[in-house]
């Protein structure tokens, strides 16, 4: 019997062992040590969780709660997250190796999702429709969509879960969550807070394990009404196909290859910071990474010089250390993928301006997962390094001449998650923002996100929106109710 801490799944208000008794290891990317074991849930466990969620949706205290009561519970969960933010952040870092600074900032911000959607719970109103027929009273109700399967990735597990959990609960849905197999523990710690807040059993459930096992069983289950998925574009497209078999609603938050465009009238030092935060923050492991840096001809040489100088100063090290700026990559497959793309870029003729390989040294501890912050110049937009998501600290710089060319390059890609625009001209900012086909545009800033503003992708970057009021609508469906006020029932052979 292993001495490691064991994490079980959370189903119907109980901590359950997996039905076939198997666990998998979770590894700290910085220490390279296995630090815990997590339940490897089977399709049977997933079915059990969906049945619990479905029962909680249709019978019992959650189903009969008022929207105000529901909102109060969601708000209370926000308070508990606020009080436990540091512990949650430490669980995140132990599993995904991202900087404690960043994970703490995220966990301190999470309560806002629960306050905002908790407040919104009892402000979702239907309408009385001035119907065009005599003796009919018609109104709409916005009802919870049903059981939600919330499937999350490893890069920001609790933030991306909160985008789903807070509005789904406020809407009256119940959930089965499947966190990434690389980062399950913070989501399980959150369940302790769900329990303390007083959510009835079955309202929130977690099955841990692998996408093809527990995850796929959720996507296929006929009693799951909606899949809220964040992950890679390839898995997202597959999940979408599987979900279509039972006509589930889907929100898909997928990959990106976002252009960060620096025009010749930009404040160069601001744009340098924007470019750095776009690619080296979070070790580049963020869907919104500004991984294609488009720089205008006239400032190209000066800008690239300043950028490389700044990037050279990035401190690698222990993510728990608050002075570290670049941590390890989260998973071995991701590490291999990044190194592969660095070789692809070299073979395509891109010029290495900084880094260009694995990193080692005392600052990397026992981890074998550090990659040097890498900058490629002379990239052409048709190269693979410009078209495919690397999800690591690898920046491709592309030169352009005119505004039209910048927009053309920005849009010449399958993705459309986000973009950055650096200029002092308001006309240029507005024109370019309108022309770029992406769900989020940042002007003279990068990586800003809020519970208040819709977030989501154009094109292959996804479907639907999270955050803001639009994020809540994704968990509701509209019912139209027709009530006759007529004295008698009219001719049954004529449609009214
Ligand atoms: P991934 O697609 O490999 O896995 C994401 C989740 O889906 C995991 O929980 C995984 O177990 C599960 N999964 C995989 N296959 C499944 C299947 N067939 N059925 C059900 N579940 C399945 O992604 P990842 O490597 O964990 O995360 C990195 C990716 O996520 C990147 O592409 C990144 O751009 C994307 N991402 C997108 C956003 C966004 O908001 N658009 C945010 C963060 C990350």
Image: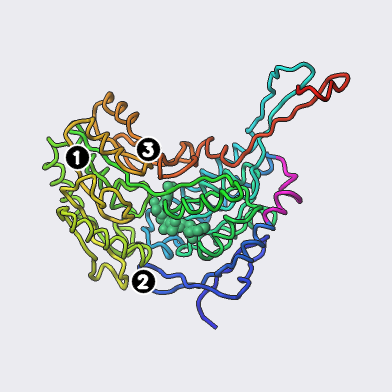
167 relative position to 26: left or right:
right
User: What segment carries the magenta color?
Assistant: 53-66
| Image position of 133 with respect to 346: above or below | above
Give the x, y percent position of residue 35.
45, 73
Name the disc covering residue 438, or none: 3
Q: How far apart are labels 1 and 2 at the CA level?
A: 38 Å
Quadrant where the image shows the C terminus: top right
Task: Tell me the chief SS of the magenta region.
Answer: helix
Instruction: Report helix, strand or loop for mark 1.
Output: strand
Q: Nearer the viewer, mark 2 or mark 3?
A: 3
Packing grade of label 3 (10 A; few <14, some 14-19, many >=20) is: many
* Residue matched to label 1: 295
Coordinates of residue 332 in the picture (x, y in percent): 36, 67
Return the disc, 1 or 2, that comes first in the chain's sequence.
2
Left or right, 434 with reference to 11: left
Residue 338: % across, % down: 29, 60
**Which residue is situated farthest in the bottom direction here?**
1
- Identify the residue under disc 2: 31
Query: Disc 2 to disc 3, how far (Cα)?
Result: 38 Å
Of the pair 218 and 241, the residue shown nearer to us: 241
Q: In the depicted view, which residue is nearer to us: 231 or 93? A: 231
User: Mark 3 falls on what kind of element?
Assistant: loop
Query: Which residue is depicted at the point 24% across and 71% down?
Result: 362
């Amino acid at each position: 019997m292993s001495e490691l801490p064991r994490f079980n799944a959370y189903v119907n208000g109980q901590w359950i062992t997996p039905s076939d008794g198997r666990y998998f290891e979770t590894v700290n990317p910085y220490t390279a040590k296995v630090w815990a074991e997590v339940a490897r849930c089977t399709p049977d466990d997933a079915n059990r969780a969906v049945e619990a969620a479905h029962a909680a949706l249709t019978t019992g205290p959650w189903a009969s709660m008022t929207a105000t009561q529901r909102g109060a519970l969601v708000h209370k969960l926000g308070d508990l997250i606020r009080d436990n933010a540091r512990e949650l952040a430490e669980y995140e870092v132990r599993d995904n190796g991202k900087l404690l600074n960043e994970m703490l900032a995220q966990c301190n911000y999470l309560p806002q999702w629960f306050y905002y959607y908790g407040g919104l719970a009892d402000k979702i109103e239907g309408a009385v429709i001035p119907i065009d027929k005599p003796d009919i009273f018609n109104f709409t109700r916005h009802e919870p969509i049903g059981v939600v399967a919330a499937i999350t990735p490893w890069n920001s597990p609790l933030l991306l879960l909160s985008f789903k959990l807070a509005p789904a609960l406020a809407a009256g849905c119940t959930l089965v969550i499947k966190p990434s197999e690389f980062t399950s523990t913070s989501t399980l710690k959150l369940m302790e807070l769900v329990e303390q807040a007083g959510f009835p059993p079955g309202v929130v459930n977690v099955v841990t394990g692998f996408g093809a096992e527990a995850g796929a069983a959720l996507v296929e289950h006929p009693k799951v009404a909606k899949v809220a998925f964040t992950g890679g574009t390839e898995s997202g497209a597959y999940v979408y196909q599987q979900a279509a078999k039972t006509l589930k609603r889907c929100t898909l938050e997928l990959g990106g290859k976002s252009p960060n465009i620096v025009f010749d009238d930009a404040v160069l030092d601001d744009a340098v910071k924007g470019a750095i935060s776009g690619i080296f923050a979070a070790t580049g492991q963020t869907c919104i990474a500004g991984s294609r840096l488009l720089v205008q001809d006239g400032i190209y040489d000066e800008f690239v010089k300043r950028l490389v100088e700044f990037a050279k100063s990035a401190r690698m090290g222990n993510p728990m250390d608050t002075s570290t700026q670049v941590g390890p990559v989260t998973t071995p497959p991701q590490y291999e993928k990044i190194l592969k793309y660095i070789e692809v870029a070299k073979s395509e003729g891109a010029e290495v301006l900084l880094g260009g390989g694995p990193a080692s040294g005392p600052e990397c501890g026992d981890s074998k997962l550090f990659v040097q912050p890498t900058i490629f110049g002379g990239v052409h937009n048709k190269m693979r390094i410009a078209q495919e998501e690397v999800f690591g600290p690898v920046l491709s710089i592309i030169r352009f001449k005119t505004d039209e060319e910048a927009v053309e390059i920005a849009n010449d890609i399958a993705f459309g998650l986000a973009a950055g625009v650096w200029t002092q001209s308001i006309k240029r900012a507005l024109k370019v923002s309108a022309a770029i086909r992406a769900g989020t545009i940042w002007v003279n800033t990068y990586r800003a996100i809020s519970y208040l503003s819709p977030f989501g992708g154009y094109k292959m970057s996804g479907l639907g929106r999270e955050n803001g009021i639009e994020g809540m609508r994704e968990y509701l469906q509209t019912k139209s109710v027709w009530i006759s006020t007529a004295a008698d029932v009219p001719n049954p052979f004529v449609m009214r």
